[in-house]
């Protein structure tokens, strides 16, 4: 063991978390700029924020930026397998209330959500709408100013609540901002999902048939990264426009049942339930690997798979093998939970810089205007979205073109001639 390895082995869990949080911070320049302003202006002075998010190094930097702005922050995990215990320990070491441990069971998961809500937050940060759902089902009397939602699945749930007229406070769908879904969902999910499969299975993508279920922003990113690694990508879709888009991007498009017969690696990214189920498991090849990049662990029908299998075992860390009655072996990564966080470290800090900067600015805006908002789902204001992108471009060394006066007049006029 080298001296450097000895150093890592000897430090405490909290100290390891501090170092990893620092490493992520170095690649989150936009959030650092926002944090510096927050420290001076104290926009959250006297405010309490409750967050149910993936407890990662990037989330830690967001929580620290909010606290620097005067907020009292409490954090719990939005997924039982996404917590990085060293990060949780480091935040606790800095005096933050954190309720999260990797591998927590369902009861503990909801106990932790309620512990955060017991701090009586003014606004909640959600990643999957779990906190908002608990507030509506179990804590109807608790007063909340508003909420923010980070992921597609959560936005779908919240829009359904708003449509049914039951949403009790305004929510900003940060996921729908351009600086979130065009980068986090595409580039973040695309890279980190494959990272999780590689860590769990150490499988070669080149030459493999990779089936991507769903061609939204997340599926688009996964398909492009798999293609870039030499895979033959097959896409399944219910939306004809997205299906044509996948085909024109060079992917084969077919039904899930046809894809099940051909695929070597299956990755779901739909937000729906039982995308791959009994009829698909029955025809998959020996050695097929299944993973889920959607928020909830429902996209693979694991209860049916377990029922169909004669036995199952953990073959490698985060890789479960199911032995079928005909001798085939089917593999599942990270218990069918979010593969990029269950088997890897989630999105790189470089892309989460924009997502969490959008979160921070949306929270500031929500506190400023919440009294004028209805109980609906809102998109982050365009000027704030553009500010995040401008800061990121500058940090990347890019320059932004400016219109001349002549060009502005031309664009503003309808009588432009031919």
Image (cartoon, grey):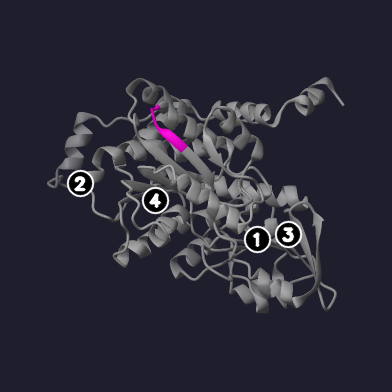
Q: Residue at x 48, y 27 (%)?
A: 29
Q: Give the CA distance from mark 3 to mark 2.
A: 53 Å
Decide which of tag 4 and tag 2 comes sooner along the chain: 4
Residue marked by disc 3 = 208
Nearer-the-camera pick, 310 or 210 = 310
Q: Are marks 3 and 2 in contact (CB under 8 Å)?
A: no
Residue marked by disc 1 = 336
Q: Give the CA distance from mark 4 to mark 3.
A: 33 Å
Residue 228 magenta-highlighted: no
Residue marked by disc 2 = 372
Q: Position of residue 373 (x, y in %)?
A: 23, 49
At mark 3, the secondary structure is: loop
The magenta-colored residue range is 69-73
Position of residue 284 in the picture relative to residue 127 (left or right): right
Decide which of tag 1 and tag 4 comes sooner along the chain: 4
Q: Are marks 1 and 4 in contact (CB under 8 Å)?
A: no
Nearer-the-camera pick, 116 or 192 = 116
Q: Residue at x 35, y 63 (%)?
A: 161
Decide which of tag 1 and tag 3 comes sooner along the chain: 3
Q: Between tags 1 and 3, which lies in front? A: 1
């Amino acid at each position: 063991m080298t001296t450097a390895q000895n150093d890592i082995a000897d430090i405490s869990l909290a100290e390891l978390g501090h170092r990893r949080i620092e490493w992520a911070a170095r690649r989150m320049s936009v959030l650092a700029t926002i944090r510096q302003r927050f420290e001076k202006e104290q926009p959250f002075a006297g405010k309490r924020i409750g967050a149910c998010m993936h407890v990662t190094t990037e989330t830690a930097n967001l929580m620290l930026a909010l606290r620097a702005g005067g907020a009292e922050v409490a954090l719990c995990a939005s997924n039982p397998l996404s917590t990085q215990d060293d990060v949780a320990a480091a935040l606790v070491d800095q005096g933050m209330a954190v309720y999260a441990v990797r591998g927590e069971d369902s009861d503990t998961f909801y106990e932790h959500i309620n512990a955060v809500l017991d701090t009586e937050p003014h606004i909640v940060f959600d990643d999957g709408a779990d906190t908002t759902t608990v507030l509506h089902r179990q804590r109807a009397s608790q007063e909340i100013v508003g909420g923010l939602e980070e992921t597609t699945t959560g936005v779908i749930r919240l829009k359904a609540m708003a449509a049914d007229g039951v949403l009790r406070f305004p929510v900003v769908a940060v996921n729908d901002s351009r600086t979130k879904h065009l980068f986090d969902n595409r580039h973040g999910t695309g890279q980190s999902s494959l990272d999780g499969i590689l860590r769990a299975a150490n499988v070669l993508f080149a030459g493999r048939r990779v089936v991507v279920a769903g061609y939204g922003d997340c599926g688009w990113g996964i398909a492009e990264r798999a293609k870039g690694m030499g895979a033959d990508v097959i896409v399944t879709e219910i939306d004809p426009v997205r299906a044509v888009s996948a085909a024109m991007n060079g992917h084969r498009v077919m039904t899930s049942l046809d894809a099940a017969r051909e695929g070597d690696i299956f990755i779901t990214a739909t937000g729906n339930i039982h995308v791959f189920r009994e009829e698909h498991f029955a025809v998959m090849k020996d050695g097929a690997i299944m993973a889920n990049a959607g928020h909830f662990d429902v996209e693979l029908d694991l209860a049916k798979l377990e029922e169909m299998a004669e036995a199952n075992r953990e073959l490698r860390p985060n890789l479960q093998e199911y032995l079928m009655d005909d001798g085939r072996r089917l593999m599942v990564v990270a218990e069918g939970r979010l593969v990029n966080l269950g088997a890897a470290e989630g999105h790189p800090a470089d892309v989460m810089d924009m997502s969490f900067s959008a979160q921070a600015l949306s929270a500031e805006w929500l506190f400023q205007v919440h009294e004028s908002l209805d109980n609906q789902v809102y998109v982050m204001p365009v000027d704030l979205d553009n500010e995040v992108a401008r800061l990121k471009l500058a940090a990347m060394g890019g320059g932004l073109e400016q219109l001349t006066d002549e060009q502005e007049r031309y664009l503003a006029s309808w009588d432009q001639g031919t």
